[in-house]
Amino acid sequence: MSINNASFIYHTLSEQIRSGRLTHQLPAERRLSELFNTTRITLRDALMQLEHQGLIYRENRRGWFVSPSRIHYNPLLNFNFNRMVSSQGRTPSTQVLSSDIIPANAQVSRWLAITEGQPVIQIRRARRIDNRLVLYAEHYLNPAYFPHILQFDFTQSLSEIYQQHYGLTYGKVRFDMQSTALSQSVANVLKMSEGSPALQIVRSNQDQHGRLIDCDYELWRHDALSVCVDV
């Protein structure tokens, strides 16, 4: 019964989402179990299939929601987050989690081609699209190029701060992308469950003079964006 019933629930809810009859929040799991006359275990199987397809998403202690359309992400276009999201008719927002000077660990030292333990500026941010948490980001800056930068408002675009106050623009950029699973700490920030799928993007950035000035470590909800490249 579980396999067939879960499949029926999946196809029923999928059709309602695709047709626009189900547009925002799903009924509570108890109510859905009653509507489909099934167990919570079978219902969860169907909901997880929908989640893996990117049709719905879950927020801890809030329930299940219909996923909005994905943002198109083209790594060949040097758009910052705010500009990329706004250009697609959506509303970006940023929450600064922390900003400080810390010693570079082994991974960050490789990204920035510096000595392990050397001071770096770390900025941690959570970013939203249409008020939905979609991105956790850590930025690591070489402080030699950004004196007194901690005084700025980091809800703004970092690239715009670089250009307006330091005369620096991005030149060559290296992208590394891979699928991953969220750690407990990042899952808590994004209001997701530990182990949820995510897209990891590491971006190392040179300025217009060819100097490696910063790197970004990003973890995106797997259903928040699609990578599109025009060659």
Image (cartoon, rainbow, N blue to C red):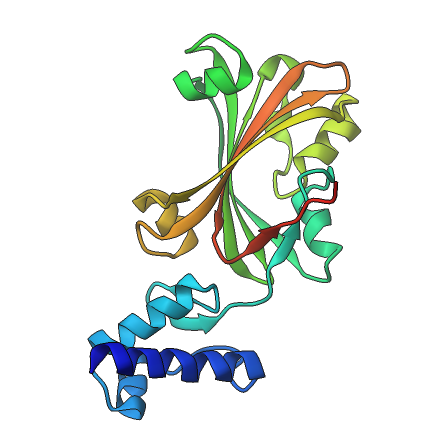
200, above or below 171, in the image: below
Locate residue 128, reporting x and y percent.
Answer: 56, 55
Q: Is residue 96 left or right of residue 28?
A: right
Which quadrant would the C terminus be assigned to in this image? Answer: top right
User: How many dots with numbers?
Assistant: 0
- Please say whether residue 105 is visible from this viewpoint: no
Q: Is residue 8 above or below residue 88?
A: below
38 w.r.t. 141: above or below = below
Where residue 176 sits, quadrant-wise, is top right
Q: Residue visible at 37% across and 56% down?
A: 192
Residue 12 drawn above or below residue 153: below
Residue drawn at point x = 76 percent, y = 55 percent = 87
As drawn, is 148 to the left or to the right of 95? right
Q: Which is nearer the eye, 124 or 204? A: 204
Q: Where is residue 164 in the image (x, y as percent from the top left)?
A: 79, 30
- Asked whether residue 123 appears in the rendered view, the answer is yes
Which of the 4 image quarters holds residue 81?
A: top right
**Foreground residue, 165 or 185?**
185
Spot the residue most to the top.
115
x, y (%) of residue 121? Answer: 53, 23
Residue that appears at 73% across and 62% down: 89
Q: Quadrant of the N terminus?
A: bottom left
